[in-house]
Image: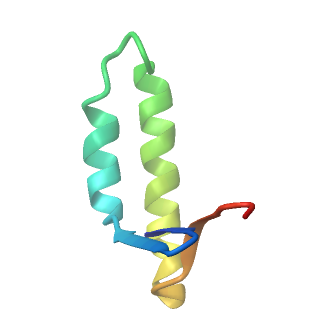
């Protein structure tokens, strides 16, 4: 997954592996997310991983300033 931020003279791009997303979701405290919701989110990530193989390098999030 690619996160790209553009503002005036600043351009910032970071690559985030989807496997890291699953790790982070598993370690969110239960008071924030229920176990059922965690399982649902992880299943959605697995689905995205399978379907995104053919779109490698596609931008998921792009942020630009209004200036």
Q: Quadrant of the N terminus?
A: bottom left
Query: Taking 30 as reference, is 22 above or below it?
Result: below
Quarter-of-image position of residue 39: top left
**Closer-to-camera residue (42/2):** 2
Q: Residue at x 34, y 51 (%)?
A: 21
Quarter-of-image position of residue 62: bottom right
Q: Quadrant of the C terminus?
A: bottom right
**Closer-to-camera residue (59/51):** 59
Q: Residue at x 34, y 71 (%)?
A: 15
**Closer-to-camera residue (51/57):** 57
Q: Residue at x 46, y 56 (%)?
A: 45
In the current view of this chain or complex, which residue is farthest to the top?
31
- Residue 58 image point, x, y percent: 54, 82
Please state if 29 lies on the left or on the right of 62 as rendered.
left
Q: Residue at x 25, y 31 (%)?
A: 27
**Closer-to-camera residue (64/28):** 64
Query: Taking 65 as reference, is 34 above or below it?
Result: above
- Residue 7 image point, x, y percent: 56, 66
- Residue 6 image point, x, y percent: 55, 70
Please state if 62 lies on the left or on the right of 3 as rendered.
right
Number of marks drawn:
0
How are the residues colored? rainbow
- Residue 17 image point, x, y percent: 31, 66
Please state if 22 lies on the left or on the right of 58 as rendered.
left
In the current view of this chain or complex, which residue is farthest to the right?
66
Query: Taking 7 as reference, is 25 above or below it?
Result: above
Query: Taking 5 as reference, is 58 above or below it?
Result: below
């Amino acid at each position: 997954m690619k996160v790209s931020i553009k503002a005036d003279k600043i351009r910032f791009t970071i690559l985030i592996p989807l496997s890291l997303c699953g790790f982070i979701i598993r370690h969110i405290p239960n008071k924030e997310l229920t176990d059922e919701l965690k399982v649902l989110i992880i299943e959605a990530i697995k689905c995205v991983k399978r379907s995104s193989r053919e779109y490698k390098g596609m931008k998921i999030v792009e942020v630009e300033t209004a200036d």
